[in-house]
Image (spheres, helix red, strand yellow):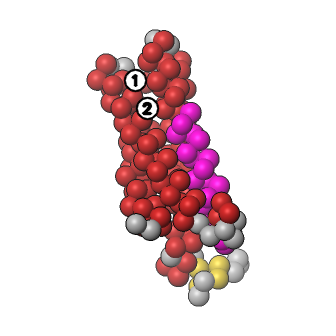
Amino acid sequence: MKMSFLHHLTLHFPIVLAFVLAGVGLWSLREDTPQLRRFMRVVGWVCFAFVTLATVSGIIAAPGWFGGDGSEALSHHRSLGVSTWVAMAIAAFSYEWGMRVGIDDWRKFAVGVWCVAAFGVVGTGHWGGAERHPDEIPWRVDGVSKPER
């Protein structure tokens, strides 16, 4: 299986999960129930696993060492993707630690980091789309940015 195919196959599920974690996490700050805690814990780890798979397959599929031979859009995509992966790791481990030691502040911190990661997903998706589909970006004309007025 080509790594680029695996990258595209595994990235859409964690995109959705990132927004679900941010939304449900914000809701869980208001309505803290054992069911929501269990959901956040399990889905957080599933999302982190898929983000890890998408990140590793994307780095392997990128041209050059660690994607260094790609375009500027690919460079931004890679940097934001790795940053989002780090944020997902921090959130998953923080939530797990908060559950294990029973400290609500760690879980609240994790929810905040998942919200930041959701913004990272938006940026990563934008730059990945700009690299993969440059002719379909509405604010470009013939692959060139529209001039400012």
Q: Residue at x 58, y 59 (%)?
A: 59
Quarter placement of the N terminus:
bottom left
Residue at (54, 65) in percent of width and height = 61
Please name the residue that numbered disc 2 is placed on: 26
Which residue shows up at 43% across the image and 24% down it?
A: 29
Q: Amino acid at mark 2?
A: Leu
Q: Which residues are magenta?
A: 70-90
Residue farthest along the left direction in this orientation:
35
**Mark number for residue 92?**
none
Residue at position x 46%, y 41% in the image: 48
**How busy is the neighbourhood of tag 1: few (under 14 within 10 Å), some, or many (20 plus)?**
few
| Image spot of residue 38 (x, y percent) | 33, 25
Label 1 near label 2: C-beta < 8 Å?
yes
Answer with left or right where residue 143 lies relative to residue 6.
right
Q: Kindly state the secondary structure of the residue where label 2 is placed.
A: helix
Residue linked to disc 1: 30
